Amino acid sequence: MIKSILYNPLFGIILSLSTFELGKRIYMKWRYPIFNPLMISITLTILFLLKFNIPYEAYSSGGNIIMFFLGPATVVLGVSLYKHTQRLKEYFFPILAGVVAGSFTAVLSVIVLGKLFGLKKLLILSMIPKSITTPIGIELSKSLGGDPSITVVGIMITGITGAISSPFICKFFKIENKISKGIGIGTSSHAVGTSKAIEMGEIEGAMSGLAIGMAGLVTIFLVPLLTKFLI
């Protein structure tokens, strides 16, 4: 009876939504960046599974359904972008230059640091897509011969880190331009970072949403070249 409940997809869905809702309430109460709802949700979910010795396979049957909706959810970000089409046309080349520079740095840093610390090739290849959105990152990881499971972890860590640190980074380096903030956050920390950009403002959120798609495309073109010569 218990096994049938645990392996029901509803178990993973309900657990994910419950922990995220709790994380959101905690964040709304204290408003500290460290209380990122997704980070709290992941932590509570892991602790719950470990505490009751529930196998990951039981959770993933429902978790994979949530994963399926990541793609459509990312597309929704285009609504706010549509409202600021004129800004995109006006600053197209600076935006493109920023996304290319950010994507190049994201990939190169993984390769250089991975080799510097003597990481295995599999781990390096799996971490290369860490700064792009999950649906694209998983497929890119597979094409490179990486492990999609490691890739997903890298993407989550990158996104949460970006969401937590982006306000401090913008303040420390005195980045006040709204378009610059959005492009920087979206390029480096995809959809999770974009959630923070949306809190900053509508323009920041729209530009960050744009950067997600652009960074994914740019990374797909850059990775084969960089991996061919550097790995």
Image (cartoon, rainbow, N blue to C red):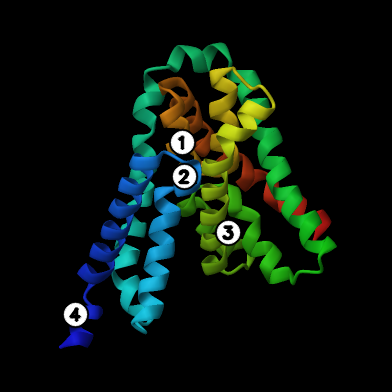
Which of the marked residues, 3 or 2, is nearer the chain's N terminus? 3
Q: Is residue 214 visible?
A: no
Examine the rendered structure and indicate whether residue 229 appears above or below residue 43: above
**SS at mark 1?**
helix
Residue under the point 38% across and 58% down: 41
Q: Position of residue 65 (x, y in %)?
A: 30, 62
Type of amino acid at the residue the image marks with label 3: Gly
User: Residue 178: percent from the left, percent from the top?
Assistant: 54, 19
Cα gap from disc 3 to disc 2, whole angstroms: 12 Å
Cβ–Cβ under 8 Å for marks 2 and 4: no
Mark 1 or mark 4, earlier in chain:
4
Say what secondary structure mark 3 lies in. helix
In the picture shown, does residue 17 fall above or below 36? below
Q: Residue at x 34, y 27 (%)?
A: 79
Q: How far apart are marks 2 and 4 (CA)?
A: 30 Å
Q: Is residue 207 left or right of residue 107?
A: left
Seen at 31% across and 61% down, the residue is 16
Tags 4 and 3 in contact by the CB under 8 Å rule? no
Residue 124 in view here = yes
Of all residues shown, which one is farthest toward the left? Answer: 1
Q: SS at mark 2? A: helix
Mark 2 — residue? Answer: 192
Q: Name the residue under label 1.
A: 196
Whole-number angstrom distance, CA of label 2 to CA of label 1: 7 Å
Query: Which quadrant of the figure has residue 118?
Result: bottom right
- Label 4 to label 3: alpha-carbon separation: 30 Å
